[in-house]
Amino acid sequence: MSKFRQYVLLGMLLTSLTGCSAKPEVSPQVMQQTLLIKCPPALPYDYGTEGSDWMLMVKEWSSLYHECATRHNGLVDILNSK
């Protein structure tokens, strides 16, 4: 066996041994408490019949939806990363 082949085999052996000796660092997963808040069961509906009242309703429903969607998506991202 040539010297070159011996060095290559020795290098491969050393590389395979050193690759297994390193242990991956595992960091604890921290879940935010804000992600555990449930969305409201029903949307508020105490608005008048005027157009401006309906605009207030749409704005409030939109903000409630986006807050809930943000929490839900954050929770899904954390659970999928495990």
Image (cartoon, grey):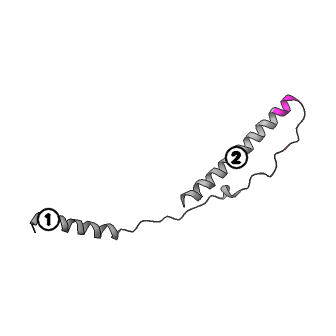
**On screen, 78 above or below 58?**
below
Q: Which residue is mark 1?
A: 5
**Residue found 86% across the figure and 42% down from its top:** 45
Count residues near mark 1 (Cα–Cα under 10 Å), then give few for <14, some for 14-19, many for 20+: few
The picture places residue 18, in percent across and down from the top left corner, at: 29, 68
Q: Does the residue at mark 2 contact the one at mark 1 (Cβ under 8 Å)?
A: no
Residue sticking out furthest to the front: 1
The residue drawn where x is 81% and y is 35% is 56
Element carrying mark 1: helix
What is the chief secondary structure element of the magenta stretch? loop
Q: Amino acid at mark 1?
A: Arg
The amino acid marked with disc number 2 is: Glu
Q: Is residue 52 above or below residue 16?
A: above
Residue bearing the label numbered 2: 67
For the point 77% across and 41% down, which residue is it? 61
Quarter of the figure with the C terminus: bottom right
Q: Kindly indicate the quadrant of the structure image that contains residue 60.
A: top right
Q: What count of labels does the image hold? A: 2
